[in-house]
Amino acid sequence: MRGMMLVARRDLAAYFNSYWGYVVIAVILLIDGLLFNAYAVGDQPKFSSKVIEDFFMLSFGCTVIASLPVTMRLFAEEKQTGTMVLLDSAPLQPWQLVGGKYLSALLVMALLVLATMFMPALVFINGKVSYGHIFAGYLGLLLLAAATTGIGTLGSAISRNQIVAFIISGLLILFFVLAWLLAKVADPPLQDIISYVSLFDRHVRGFMQGKVSTESVVFYLSVAFATLLMSSRFLAARRWR
């Protein structure tokens, strides 16, 4: 555990010792803020609950997009700069490397998600929203961040440079996001299986509406665990080459 925390601290410092972490957070917050003002609030009267629901839907997309630049550098940058050799020779298990790097990226994602809290807070100026609705929405965003960060970690682990990692992770996430469209044209029981593995629709809508589903919580955590397990297995196999 100590080794994993050392890796996490090293990578977390790398995010904020350069402009990369600040730029990613600033750009995503800017996009999220503009979308919130243009679409969630809009120029037509809305119920406060509808504004919050639209806000979480827009934040869903921003969170998915943000996970790509945050995770693409985790292992791919080490391979590009040649420092991966140092990590391979370090007295650390693959799961410690993966866990440490994942934790650092997840903390950046959590910071980004929580930094948007001022937007739903603005609704309280002229409206009233259930605190439970906001809690459920942010729980969904954090679970989504955990899942997409895991997918991004896997994409970076199997790639030799950051651009390829970005593309691979983007394609994997795109498949999981759009799986609900494929489910519409599939027949049962395949329809239920495809619908279940979709990051969107079946799982995210409940959180957007202020509902916490145990099934969705388990799903997002399972995606994170499975992708991290595959990442550590890939690194372990790489060491034996």
Image (cartoon, rainbow, N blue to C red):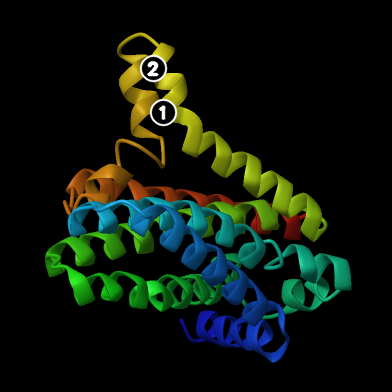
Q: Mark 2: few, some, or many residues within 10 Å (few <14, many ≥20)?
A: few
Q: Is residue 41 above or below residue 103?
A: above
Q: Is residue 216 left or right of residue 11?
A: left
What amino acid does circle 1 point to? Trp
What amino acid does circle 2 point to? Lys
Residue 234 marker:
none
Residue drawn at 46 percent across, 29 percent down: 179
Residue drawn at 45 percent across, 24 percent down: 181
Q: Tell me whether circle 1 and circle 2 mark residues in contact (CB < 8 Å).
A: yes
Judging by the rendered image, the residue that carries numbered circle 2 is 184
Q: Is residue 40 above or below residue 18?
A: above
Q: Is residue 170 left or right of residue 230?
A: right
Count up the numbered dots: 2
* Image x and y of residue 190, in percent: 37, 16
* Image x and y of residue 240, in percent: 75, 56
In whole angstroms, how far apart are the C-alphas of marks 1 and 2? 7 Å
Q: Is residue 80 left or right of residue 18?
A: right
Badge 2 marks a residue whose secondary structure is: helix
* Image x and y of residue 61, in percent: 48, 51
Residue 180 marker:
1
Evaluate whether residue 228 shows in this view: no
Residue drawn at 73 percent across, 76 percent down: 87
Residue drawn at 59 percent across, 76 percent down: 26
Evaluate whether residue 121 shows in this view: yes
Front position in the image: 181 or 47: 47
